[in-house]
Image (cartoon, grey):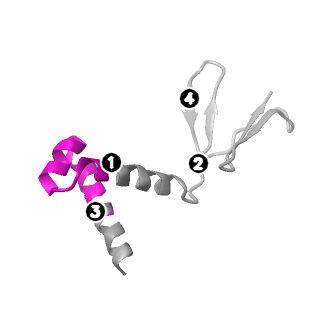
C-alpha cells in the first residue's frame, strides 16, 4: 500500500537524521526533502513512540533530593499513600509518608 510505504520511507528519513548528528535543515538538504516535512514526521513519529505500552521503571526520590533508580521494590513505612496522582496516560504517582 502506498501509505505504508510512505510511512516507512519517512521513518527511515527520521532515523537517518537522528543518527546523522547534523541539523534538520542540513539533513533535509542532503536527502532532498523539505525541512518542514522532516520536522512534521519527526513530531508525528515522536508521539507514536511515546504511546507505546512500555511501563516506566520505579524511581525513588529521597528526602535529600537524590534520585535513585531501581527495579527492586522499596520498604514502605505506610501502606496508605499520602498523595496519589493519576495522569491521563495511566501513569500513577503515589507518595507515601
As helix, strand or loop, the secondary structure at mark 2 comes to: loop
Is residue 30 within the magenta segment?
Answer: yes
**Quick one: label 4 or label 3, which is nearer the N terminus?**
3
**Quick one: label 3 or label 1, which is nearer the N terminus?**
3
Between marks 2 and 1, how big is the CA–CA gap? 27 Å
Between marks 4 and 3, how big is the CA–CA gap? 36 Å
Q: Where residue 91 sits: x, y (%)? A: 67, 46
According to the picture, the residue beneath numbered tag 2 turns out to be 56
Question: Residue at (33%, 48%) from the top-left corner?
Answer: 39
**Quick one: label 2 or label 1, which is nearer the N terminus?**
1
According to the picture, the residue beneath numbered tag 4 turns out to be 67
- Looking at the rendered image, the quarter that the C terminus falls into is top right
Q: Quadrant of residue 15?
A: bottom left
**Can you tell which mark lies on residue 39?**
1
Query: Mark 1 against mark 4, which lies toward the viewer?
Result: 1
Q: Could you tell whether 90 is left or right of 47 in the image?
A: right
According to the picture, the residue beneath numbered tag 3 turns out to be 12
Tell whether label 1 touches label 3 (CB within 8 Å): no
Between marks 2 and 4, how big is the CA–CA gap? 15 Å
Tell whether label 1 touches label 2 (CB within 8 Å): no
Between marks 1 and 4, how big is the CA–CA gap? 33 Å
Between marks 3 and 1, how big is the CA–CA gap? 13 Å
Image height of 1 relative to 35, above or below: below
Circle 2 crowding by C-alpha within 10 Å: few under 14, some 14–19, many from 20: few
As helix, strand or loop, the secondary structure at mark 4 comes to: strand
Amino acid at each position: 500500500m502506498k501509505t505504508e510505504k510512505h510511512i516507512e520511507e519517512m521513518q527511515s528519513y527520521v532515523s537517518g537524521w537522528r543518527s546523522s548528528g547534523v541539523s534538520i535543515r542540513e539533513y533535509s538538504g542532503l536527502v532532498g526533502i523539505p525541512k518542514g516535512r522532516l520536522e512534521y514526521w519527526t513530531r508525528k513519529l515522536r508521539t507514536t513512540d511515546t504511546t507505546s505500552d512500555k511501563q516506566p521503571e520505579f524511581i525513588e526520590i529521597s528526602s535529600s533530593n537524590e534520585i535513585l533508580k531501581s527495579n527492586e521494590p522499596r520498604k514502605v513505612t505506610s501502606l496508605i499513600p499520602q498523595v496519589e496522582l493519576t495522569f491521563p496516560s495511566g501513569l500513577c504517582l503515589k507518595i507515601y509518608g
